[in-house]
Amino acid sequence: MAGIPAMSQDSASRVALVIGNSAYQNVEALPNPANDARLIAEKLWESGFEVIESIDADRETMLADLATFRSRLREGSEALFFYAGHGVQVGGRNYLLPVSVIPSSVDDLRTQSVDAQLFVDIMGGSGARLNIILLDACRNNPFAGMETEDADEIATRAITIGQSREEVQRGLVLLSEASSGGLAEMTAGDSETMISFATAPGAVAYDGVGQHSPYTESIAESIDEPGIELAELFRRVRGGVRERTEGQQIAWTTSTLENPFYFKPDTDDLRTSTTGLGTEGDTLGALPPQRIVDRVFWRSIQGTERLDAFEAYLKTSPDGAFVEDAAAKVVALGGNPGAILAVDPALPDLQQQAGDRQTSYKADVVDRLARSQNAVPIGVGPFEIALTDQTSDGWVHVSRAPRLGAVRSADGAAFDQGSVHYVRAGEISEFQPHIGSNGGLEALEGQVLGAGGATEPVQVSVESYVDACDMLAGNPYDGKRVTAGTRQFILDRNFDGAIVTCELAVERHPDVVRFWAQLARAYRAAGRYEEARDWQVKAVEAGYVNAMVYLGQMHLDGQAVAQDFARAYDLFESAAAEGDTAALTALAWVHRAGVGVPQDYAVARKFYERGAARGNDWAMTNLGEFYQKGFGVERNPQEAERWYIQAAKSGELTAQTRLARMYQDGDGIPRDFDQARFWFETAASRKVPNGMTRLGIMYEQGQGVPTDIEAAARLYVRAAQEGDGEAYFRLGKLYASKTPLFDDPSRAALLLERAITERVYGAERELAKLYESGRGVQKDMSKARELYSVAAEGNPWAARDAGRAFASNDGVTADFASAATWYRQAAEGGVPWAALDLAKMTEAGRGVVQDRTEALALYAKALSLSDDENLARLVGDAVANYSQSEFVTAAQVMLTQAGKQPGVADGQLGAGTRRALNEAFADQGVDLPAGAITIEILAVLAALN
């Protein structure tokens, strides 16, 4: 058994969780936190952090993103948490408020918000070498002097779920008195931790009059400067806040740090401070922060006249800075942006929209684009830039050189810090970004040395950036990638944007083979196999190793090429020989499936183990499956759990959902709803549709969390928006259930119709119930019968419902023969009530031949299938008019059916019948009661049959 590898210690592990809540639905909204969070997320990503960005998050989203953050922390990590939004102090503890908060009491506040100490404790217990907590949450208390409209919304909800108006009014008064806008001091524990507040404990911070708060603006400004140690950086932040607020606000910091930390350290290898560029596949594989996506995507397409480019932007960034511009361009090019941005009318709107904040957000992104005068993609070669506008030759002294790339003169001399160069008038230099960073905006600074010792300052801005093609289609398992890469699940949701940006990248940089391979990957994700084949072949011929793996997969599947197992195997072997770990998982699959070679789980496992040893988390996931299901090894759930955990922590989404299911079901390991919820949260955080649905079910059913129907509904809506059919079904059942706040059968009908189109099991039955009752739709028993009949295929309870519908004469003619058929199907499927229904029909001869012996057997079957006391009472009442002779006859018939040979069914309890009864009861491991034959004895015989 191969050991599970430790995560690479050579690769950086800088992980940040950034939350910004502005669009509060039931308390005062805030203009800046969402913009503050986006700005900090951008700065951290450009500093090498893997960023989990959460904008306008409800409570379940905050907890899900916290779970993802926690899953990515490891021994030696550098962890950072930033929060901007409402935060209040209650009883000496600090609570961060989700946008969904709607408390009518202090207890509600505690359960609907998130204790800030939870973040500190998780970070402190993670093994991270350093933790940084930044809280821009000390704004005014939203519950003091609450707007009447907000108070009414809170009161309406509370009364709807059962509170009295007096309770609500008293709770709101106590809430206002108990909470404080200033935050309480927090402890950092034993780990190396720095906690920074926007202002002193108990004081209130300013939201700011511009696009950002004074605190956030000061942090962002300081992070940009390379080589500043953390303590010095926050001294500057304190000064910046004081200056911006004219001394009215003082940032406050507590720290147990012992070792230095730099956001942008001086290093010869940028990969060492950039998460995701070490071990292949060790990444969330999600898109970068929204400001990065917006800026890079728009930069790629803004000069084109391609309709599909602007449509792709709308699909990829429906909340992006340039949505209005893109929509206008789509219209101008003859398209329909409304069709792209349309919202499913069946889905309820449970989220507050961003509103006017998009204006200030766009201004930020536009400003950054305007300052990008010499913007160069990473990994495409040098670009020409003009260092000075001098009109005569002269010497230039370099006082600061770019950290993220190299500037070289026409003769190849490097403009390093401290160097002096003779530059001719009009001379063009070159800037080439280094591979290993996420890019950023910086400058070459120096002085032009003039006659007589005079100097003139020179400053040339340069920007390194990850091209949109790399951002949307880069492969995490590609050893030549220039960024962390995008997991297949993310690419499958954004292939339109990936295709457009990679086509444009190939046009602009036709010699960059990496773009060829990524374009092929995007085409394949879209099912455009001919184009994928052409570019994969071209990349393979150019020697691009990772392309060999994907061309091999196309040969395996016969996608626009002849199915050729031998050719596929050769390509996989060639790529594996060059060190490609994805090739090892492909070779494993060939032996696992037995395509072109004999099926051999042992050989497959060896390849997976080789891939896992090199950090390939898809190999780890497959090893987990081998041990979970016993493929070529003895089934070992504990070993499966260990492999799944390793892959899940690396960011592999399939491993996360499988692990969650193992914990939820107790599949060979102890059932653990807390762990199940945790791993469903990590999947939900990455917008895995069924991950959100499964998490919603846990909230709805109170598995590992207190029951929270509102959280469940929000999760179902988000999952449905991502195309999960089960989410429509769950949401439809919720709106049909008469649950307070969600009693809307008309909406339920729309949702269930959509679930039916998605072929979700059980949807027809739930919609049939609405047609049967006339709730939300016009009552229509014929339609109900039709739906129940469809649902009954594979669902015995729906078969029982069909039986009831066909037996009904409510607006239709009763069809007892069909009813009996459906009842029989349901009873054979184990539905006790259907057996009872059929027994009554058989006793009366409705729809079937009258047969009291058969009816008695069916009553016994109903009793055998359930321990429901009400059903037992009904059966007892029904059989009270049967004679002992009829009971004996029924027993004899049932014994004969069980192969026990009681003799002729004559209603006489003779020796043969007694012997057969004793034998039947012995088979069940129970003693035959003495005395007369009873319905309970017949129930035992029914269970035997």
Image: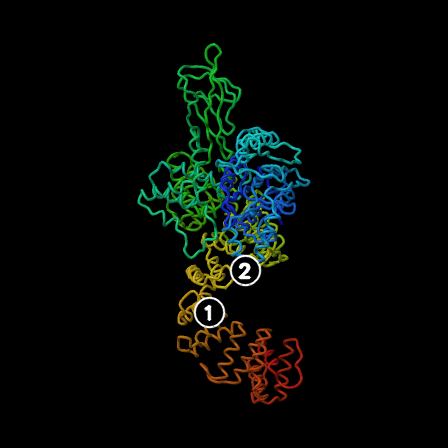
Position of 245 relative to 455 (above/below): below
- Which residue is disc 2 drawn over? 161
Instruction: Work out whether residue 924 or residue 14 is closer to the camera in this orientation and state it.
Output: 14
CB-based contact (under 8 Å), mark 2 and mark 1 = no
- Which residue is disc 1 drawn over? 792
Callout 1: SS: loop
Name the residue rendered at 42%, 31% in the picture: 370
The x, y position of residue 689, in whole percent, is 49, 53
| Quadrant occupied by the C terminus | bottom right
Q: Residues within 10 Å of mark 1 (few under 14, many from 20)?
A: many
Callout 2: SS: loop
Instruction: Work out whether residue 5 or residue 19 is closer to the camera in this orientation and state it.
Output: 19
Residue 752 lies left or right of residue 607; in this view the side is left
Q: Which mark is residue 866?
A: none
The x, y position of residue 156, in whole percent, is 51, 57
The x, y position of residue 621, in whole percent, is 55, 50
Name the residue rendered at 67%, 36% in the picture: 256
Q: Residues within 10 Å of mark 2 (few under 14, many from 20)?
A: few
The amino acid type, in three-letter code, at marker 2 is Ile
